[in-house]
Amino acid sequence: MMNTRMWKNHDLNKNYDVVIIGGGAHGLATAYYLSKLGITNVAVLEQKFIGYGGSGRNTAILRSNYRTEEGIKFYDQSLKLYENLAGELNFNLMFSQQGHFTLGHSTAALSGLTTRAENNKALGINSYILDPKEIKKMLPEIDISDHPRFPVMGALYHPPGGIIRHDAVVWAYARGADQAGVQIHQLTKVEDILIDKGKVTGVVTNRGTVNCKQLISVVAGWSSDVCHKAGVKLPFVTHPLQALVTLSYKPWLHHVVVSGTLHIYLSQTDRGELVCGNGIDTYPHYGMRSTLGFLESYAAHVLELFPILHNVAVQRQWAGLCDMTPDYSPIISSIDEIEGFYVNGGWGTYGFKASPASGYNTAQMVANGKTPEMINPFRYNRFMENRLVGEKAAASVSS
Ligand SMILES: Cc1cc2nc3c(=O)[nH]c(=O)nc-3n(C[C@H](O)[C@H](O)[C@H](O)COP(=O)(O)OP(=O)(O)OC[C@H]3O[C@@H](n4cnc5c(N)ncnc54)[C@H](O)[C@@H]3O)c2cc1C
């Protein structure tokens, strides 16, 4: 059997039409959708290896039951693209639409979840409120008694939500882009951005200088650093987010469960591991170390919901970087002051689910020189014009 590589290595060319900084799912999806529009003189420059960032570190939860009209429509487009992606890219992405619970532990939380359910319904998204008995039927191991500090009072249930194999998404987009002629350059770090008379002209990398007509920064947790190289200041603040995985157990959890109040979430993979996470570390920084404090706090909180987990063994834990924006929505935008420069970031703790729609719309924007309607609300000037897309209530616990 011939052993073919999924993507090729290349010498770095001197000139490309488009350079994409960042080999995560968003950068690679952008490259893939650009190639579908006939733009293939494209280089993806990745400082380490593809999937090194959040795309290889996330907990792979997909859903579209957001809060605002702009957010709901965008994440719904992404979920729909995900539904056909395995076939389109001919790669088993192990997408399991097993249903997603967001638990409510107070009347205030339930009121927020009810607003989301109504907004979702109005836009055709399958998402509705369940009471504790209905929750117990679907999650028999959950404690719905009044014993926990924050008893479960209800949940927003979203049947199309679920989990996917995140690294497979990265590899599949990489292979698709490579097959169309895009060049993927790993171990290629962008050290500076070249601008002449208000127009982007190229980048300086550790492998030499590359000229380009259009440059897209798609670097999530590194967004402020890369934008700084172009002299662009956007409201990104980077926080670490931690996660852990247990050893494999017999399948018992058949849905994704999230609790905003307890700051925890969990799901079970096909291999039986529990994939677990909580909210961002409260202090901003660029370190990717996981902590004992995270493990202790996660364990204490998850046991309130699922006491049967008192004896599980943790296999490993890790952290990734999350580029938070003030309204918990992304920035996908051309930058008015620099012709040919685009920023795609602000994916916080929730961006993996957006990879297809993010890549699709970014490619359209770059190819046509016009911002598609779908992502117009995510332009950076919304912060100057007081038109925020407030998703904090729907996006805050990393899922
Ligand atoms: C623990 C954790 C759990 C998460 N769980 C979920 C979840 O369940 N669902 C969900 O939807 N989202 C989740 N997220 C968020 C999600 O992972 C990110 O929003 C998403 O992966 C961002 O993808 P990206 O392609 O934009 O960026 P990344 O995957 O971070 O890729 C950016 C790349 O840019 C590269 N880079 C940076 N600087 C340079 C440079 N100067 N030159 C060249 N390359 C550079 C980096 O090396 C990196 O590979 C989670 C994140 C973490 C950390």
Image (cartoon, helix red, strand yellow):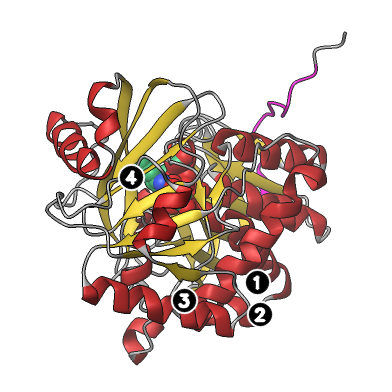
Decide which of 90, 13 is in the foreground and name it. Answer: 90
SS category of the residue bearing label 2: loop
SS category of the residue bearing label 1: helix
The residue carrying mark 2 is 370
Alpha carbons under labels 1 and 4: distance apart: 45 Å
The residue carrying mark 4 is 142
SS category of the residue bearing label 4: loop
Pinpoint residue 327: horizontal percent, then vertical percent.
32, 74
The amino acid type, in three-letter code, at marker 2 is Lys
Residues at discs 2 and 1 in contact (Cβ within 8 Å): yes
The residue carrying mark 3 is 117
Compared to residue 307, the image places residue 236 above or below, namely: below
Ligand 1 lies under 8 Å from the Cβ of mark 2: no
| Occupied quadrant, residue 135 | bottom left
Compared to residue 254, the image places residue 366 above or below, namely: below
Quadrant location, the N terminus:
top right
The residue carrying mark 1 is 365
Alpha carbons under labels 2 and 1: distance apart: 5 Å
Decide which of 260, 390 is in the foreground and name it. Answer: 260
Q: Residue at x 61, y 68 (%)?
A: 76
- Closer mark to the observer between disc 3 and disc 4: 4
Q: Is residue 230 visible?
A: yes
Q: Earlier in the sequence, mark 3 or mark 4?
A: 3
